């Protein structure tokens, strides 16, 4: 884990939009404020889990964080049915109770408008479960901007697996050499890089409630306005 006091210099994006044909965008933490997810999994679910098992919230959180880590970077991590079964809680119902917290990052809509006006192929590519995706698209209304929305469960692998991007290319027929991917997870960017996607952007401000953390390797942005021509 990176030392909290380590200061990482920001690598600024440097490319020409003339070279880009396809734009792939992550959802949680990239387009949407990750504060919702952090709150839901680290506060709201532990509160209900502690009541169910008659344990302290602190103990519930400790147990749950350990279980989350066991399936991190797999399809199970985002599978609401998996967690409902594992935890004995109706996870989709709990998400609906706090869906008012779901929000779009600043300048996202403007960026989507720019991609549309520039005639770029625009795809939402997410590890989120289809139930989660439905809840968030209904709450934010960003779905119509995209040529297609794809969940990792459709592909059969999480985005952290380089094979994901090959399978995705079969589904979308995109050229990795003229494709830009923006994501708030470095492991995802690394797997995409291994496959051959050329333009990789790290979203450093994934949550409005957390400090900005720049990537040591990939060009970073705080907001999508940094990618738009001035």
Image (spheres, grey):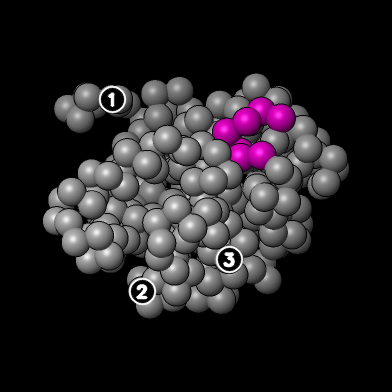
Number of marks in picture: 3
Q: Which residue is mark 1?
A: 2
Which residue is drawn at the image coordinates 54% and 59% (left, top)? 81
Tell me the magenta residue range: 157-163
Q: Residue at x 65, y 48 (%)?
A: 152
Observer-side mark, 3 or 1, equals 3
Q: Residue furthest front?
A: 53
Observer-side mark, 2 or 1, equals: 2
Q: Which residue is labeled 3 in the image? A: 131
Q: Residue 114: percent from the left, percent from the top?
A: 62, 59
Q: Quadrant of the N terminus?
A: top left
State the CA–CA distance, disc 3 to disc 1: 33 Å
Q: Residue at x 45, y 74 (%)?
A: 93
Q: Earlier in the sequence, mark 3 or mark 1?
A: 1
Task: Give the residue number, with chain letter if any, for mark 2.
Answer: 98
Near mark 3 (Cα within 10 A), the count class, few <14, some 14-19 or many ≥20, is: some
Q: Main secondary structure of the magenta part?
A: loop
Distance between the alpha carbons at the discs numbered 3 and 2: 15 Å
- Sequence-wise, the earlier of marks 3 and 2 is 2
Label 2 with label 1: CB-CB less than 8 Å: no
- Neighbours of disc 1 within 10 Å: few (<14), some (14-19), many (20+): few
Q: Nearer the viewer, residue 59 or 186?
A: 59
Q: Considering depth in this image, is 175 or 169 the residue closer to the camera?
A: 169
For disc 2, the neighbor class at 10 Å (few under 14, some 14 to 19, many from 20) is: few
- Give SS at disc 2: loop
Badge 3 marks a residue whose secondary structure is helix
Rendered location of residue 85, percent (x, y): 49, 58
What residue lies at 54% left-to-right and 46% top-to-bottom? Answer: 76
For marks 2 and 1, the one nearer the N-term is 1
Q: Nearer the viewer, residue 79 or 114?
A: 79
């Amino acid at each position: 884990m990176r030392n909290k006091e380590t200061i990482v210099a920001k690598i600024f994006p440097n490319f020409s939009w003339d070279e880009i044909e396809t734009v792939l965008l992550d959802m949680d933490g990239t387009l949407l404020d990750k504060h919702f997810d952090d709150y839901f999994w680290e506060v709201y679910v532990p509160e209900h889990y502690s009541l169910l098992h008659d344990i302290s919230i602190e103990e519930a959180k400790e147990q749950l964080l350990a279980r989350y880590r066991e399936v991190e970077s797999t399809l199970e991590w985002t599978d609401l049915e998996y967690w409902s079964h594992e935890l004995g809680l109706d996870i989709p119902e709990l998400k609906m109770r706090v869906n008012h917290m779901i929000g779009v990052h600043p300048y996202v809509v403007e960026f989507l408008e720019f991609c549309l006006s520039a005639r770029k192929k625009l795809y939402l590519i997410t590890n989120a479960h289809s139930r989660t995706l439905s809840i968030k698209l209904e709450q934010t209304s960003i779905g119509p901007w995209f040529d297609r929305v794809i969940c990792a469960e459709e592909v059969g692998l999480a985005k952290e697996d380089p094979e994901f991007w090959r399978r995705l290319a079969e589904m979308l027929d995109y050229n990795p050499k003229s494709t830009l991917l923006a994501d708030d997870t470095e492991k995802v960017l690394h797997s995409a890089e291994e496959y051959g996607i050329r333009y990789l952007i790290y979203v450093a401000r994934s949550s409005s409630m957390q400090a900005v953390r720049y990537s040591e390797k990939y060009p970073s942005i705080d907001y999508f306005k940094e990618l738009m021509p001035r």
